[in-house]
Amino acid sequence: MAWLRTIVTACVLAVPALAQDAPKAPESPEPPMTYERLGRILFALDENAQPAGAGFQLTISGVPMLIVTDQAADRMRAMVPLRRAEGLTAEDMMRMMQANFDTALDARYAVAKGRLWAVFIHPLSSLEKDQLISSLGQTVNIARTYGTLYTGGALQFGGGDSPGIQRQLIEELLEKGEEI
């Protein structure tokens, strides 16, 4: 139980370091997110976006993304395919799980249908415009940084493993620099 107390303490102390982009309080409440409203936002992000069944295909910063909605279940999912899941090592999986805890932010790494994905999943109706846009950016960022920093692109939660792992490179370079 000492390990649990250590983690809880680290997490409580790290609360100010939470990186999720907290939406600013709107001056007036936003209307519920619908398929139509989602489409207007996505077309503003990519004028070449295309409806695809109950979702959309678009490209954000050169990264193709699929958005799927289910209004009856009040869910949406943004997905970027990364690679085949076959061949993922235990180390790969461990690193992705660590990132899901502290640096992937609102986006996540996931495995489905034999593929590794960068995903963002949220109830549709309560999704706010700025939250959607930030989370799509985070999903693109974890796709781009897969295999390197595994980050959603903003600050990170201080109670996880990623800061130490990322600091390791700096330490290694500083150590090499001492020989000069």
Image (cartoon, rainbow, N blue to C red):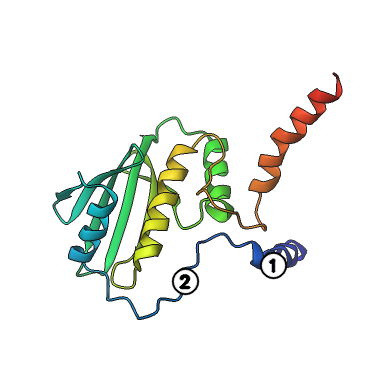
Q: Which mark is residue 24?
A: 2
> Crowding near pointer 2: few (<14 within 10 Å), some, many (20+)?
few
Q: Which mark is residue 8?
A: 1
Image point (29%, 61%), residue name: 76
Q: Is residue 29 above or below residue 23?
A: below
Q: Nearer the viewer, residue 164 or 35?
A: 35
Image point (53%, 42%), residue name: 150
Q: Quadrant of the C terminus?
A: top right
**Residue 122 occupies which quadrant of the picture?**
bottom left
Q: Is residue 4 above or below residue 46?
A: below
User: Residue 151 location, x and y as percent?
Assistant: 53, 46
The local secondary structure at tag 1 comes to helix
Q: Name which of mark 2 and mark 1 comes first in the sequence.
A: 1
In this picture, residue 44 sits left or right of residue 166: left
The local secondary structure at tag 2 comes to loop
Q: Is residue 121 above or below residue 152?
A: below
**Residue 102 occupies which quadrant of the picture?**
bottom right
Which amino acid type is marked by label 2?
Answer: Lys
**Residue 94 occupies which quadrant of the picture?**
top right
Q: Is residue 31 above or below residue 116?
A: below
Q: Are marks 2 and 1 in contact (CB under 8 Å)?
A: no
User: Residue 153 location, x and y as percent?
Assistant: 52, 48
Q: Quadrant of the N terminus?
A: bottom right
Q: Nearer the viewer, residue 4 or 171?
A: 171
